């Protein structure tokens, strides 16, 4: 009789643990999908910003407004 009660308790514990594991697994999958979605959104925003403000546009804009690049031949270092 004791073995039957023990086996029923083990089965009940196993069912509870299985339910918990399934719940935890679903939450993990949901969070992973959300992370993937946010990563894709972040990459799209990076590309958008890189296209809006890139080096060639910034260089052209600065030269149009009077920026003069540094002549490294005229720069001296103090010892």
Image (spheres, rainbow, N blue to C red):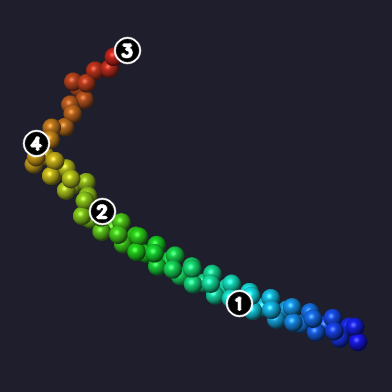
Q: Quadrant of residue 68?
A: top left
Q: Is residue 38 left or right of residue 78?
A: right
Question: In front: mark 1 or mark 4?
Answer: 1
Disc 2 crowd rating (10 Å Cα; few below 14, some 14-19, many 20+) is: few
Question: In front: mark 1 or mark 2?
Answer: 1
Give above or below for 79 relative to 8: above
* x, y percent for residue 10: 79, 79
Disc 4 crowd rating (10 Å Cα; few below 14, some 14-19, many 20+) is: few
Which label's residue is closer to the chain start, 3 or 4?
4
**Helix, strand or loop at mark 4:** loop
Which label's residue is closer to the chain start, 1 or 4?
1
Residue occupying image coordinates x 69% and y 76%? 17
Q: Which residue is mark 2?
A: 50
Q: Is residue 67 left or right of residue 31?
A: left
Q: Between 47 and 22, which is closer to the camera in this rendering? A: 22
Residue occupying image coordinates x 18% and y 29%? 70
Residue 33 shows which numbered tag? none
Give above or below for 12 relative to 44: below
Give above or below for 20 relative to 74: below
Q: Is residue 65 left or right of residue 16?
A: left
Q: Between 77 and 20, which is closer to the camera in this rendering? A: 20
Q: Is residue 55 left or right of residue 65?
A: right
* x, y percent for residue 42: 35, 60
Q: Which residue is mark 3?
A: 79
Q: Which residue is mark 1?
A: 22
Disc 3 crowd rating (10 Å Cα; few below 14, some 14-19, many 20+) is: few
Which label's residue is closer to the chain start, 1 or 2?
1
């Amino acid at each position: 009789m004791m073995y039957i009660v023990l086996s029923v308790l083990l089965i009940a514990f196993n069912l509870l643990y299985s339910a918990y594991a399934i719940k935890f697994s679903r939450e993990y999958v949901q969070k992973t999908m959300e992370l993937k979605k946010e990563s894709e959104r972040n990459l799209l925003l990076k590309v958008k910003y890189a296209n809006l403000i890139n080096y060639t546009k910034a260089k052209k804009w600065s030269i149009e407004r009077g920026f003069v690049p540094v002549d490294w031949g005229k720069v001296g270092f103090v010892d």
